[in-house]
Image: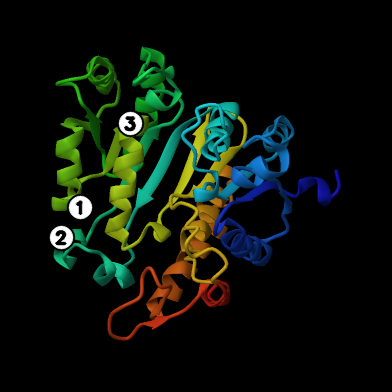
Amino acid sequence: MTAADLRARIALLPGDGIGPEIGAAARKALGALGDFEITEYRIGGASIDADGVALTDEVLEACRASDAVLLCAVGGPKWDTTDPDAPRPEQGLLGLRKGLGLFANLRPVRPSDALLEASPLRRKRIEGTDLLVVRELTGGIYFGDSGRDGDSAHDDCAYTVAEIERIARVAFEAAGERHGRVTSVDKANVLETSRLWRETVSRLAPEYEGIELDHLLVDNAAMQLVSRPSDFDVIVTENLFGDILSDEAAMLTGSLGMLPSASLGEKGPGLFEPVHGSAPDIAGTGKANPLATLLSVGLMLRYGLGQHEDAQRLEQAVDAALAQGLRTPDLAGGEGTREVGTEEMTEAVLAAL
């Protein structure tokens, strides 16, 4: 086997909006860290424009053949439509998750010390926050039956015991490597799927000795996440609730531009992506925050490629750039800080590697 055969194969999906700009930052970081085989493919609106669909079969197969997939952003007003038959950029992301069998989304939230003042919450409220949102990805309302009939519409939510069990086990195992606490979030006072969720998670809990389990209704969880975020360790929840709560948790860091994510399956490549959207209003202006994408590269190195030391190097380099007082516009403000753009922030991270 040659050295070229050993190169990790990464499928890079820049997508839409600021995607190409932050994708370029990811390429630079990977180039500084090692020798990777990186191939770009279209997804989302870019794929709709070129291929008529948000994700082609050929791109899906290329992603399956990769060692890891890095997605930057999809969507934008150009492709917004109320036509249920028209392709939408988000279908590319959902199809990718389903096609790769990715059922667990991990979203770590640990505010950087340098950004505690950037958070909308008081410093004393967020100090010590280190939580992980574990979101179920392939079930629930996003994948249920939907449709319209005259002046009514429906979106159905369904979960099986097997789907709940496998995501709950991910959460319990993650808690075992962290601080030993799992908070399961549902709406069991109203929804039948949530009652099944709570019953299933509770039944599994005794298998994980030493792990504490508590349950919160989603509306209460949304409140507690901003009133006592440092009390959480691992939060596990279904697809829709996880989508909302993880974005809320992102603001603890001061910006959506700081939150990475990893989506994993039982086998095959994982999908790594920043939580933020495509930000079409600043696309092409050089103002996009690349840090969530660089931190997603870190998750890819750790969870997707097993390169833990390089992942730590990159994460520490991000902290170092922020400690210098550098801030993209979404983070700007405060004494001793200086506003910079995408390229300068990226170069500062690379210089700290």
Q: Residue furthest bottom?
A: 336
Residue 125's disc number: 2
Foreground residue, 96 or 297?
Answer: 96
Task: Tell me residue 100's x, y (percent).
Answer: 59, 30
Residue 241 visible somewhere in the drawing: yes
Q: Which residue is mark 1?
A: 230
Residue 305 visible somewhere in the drawing: no
Three-letter residue code for mark 3: Phe
Q: Quadrant of the N terminus?
A: top right
Helix, strand or loop at label 1? It is: helix
Rate crowding at label 2 as few (under 14), some (14 to 19) or many (20 or more) other CA atoms within 10 Å.
Answer: some
Q: Which of the two discs, 1 and 3, labels the residue nearer the N terminus?
A: 3
Foreground residue, 48 or 318?
Answer: 48
Q: Could you tell me how far apart the alpha carbons at marks 1 and 2 are, in whole angstroms?
A: 8 Å
Helix, strand or loop at label 3? It is: helix
Q: Quadrant of the C terminus?
A: bottom right
Q: Nearer the viewer, mark 3 or mark 2?
A: 2
Task: Tell me residue 271's x, y (percent).
Answer: 56, 41
Rate crowding at label 3 as few (under 14), some (14 to 19) or many (20 or more) other CA atoms within 10 Å.
Answer: many
Q: Which residue is mark 3?
A: 172
**Apparent side of residue 151 relative to residue 44 in the rendered image (left or right):** left
**Proximity of marks 1 and 2: CB atoms separated by less than 8 Å:** yes
Q: Is residue 6 above or below residue 169?
A: below
Helix, strand or loop at label 2? It is: helix
Q: Residue furthest front?
A: 150
Q: Residue drawn at (20%, 34%), measured in percent from left and top? A: 218
Three-letter residue code for mark 1: Ser
Q: Is residue 160 above or below residue 295?
A: above
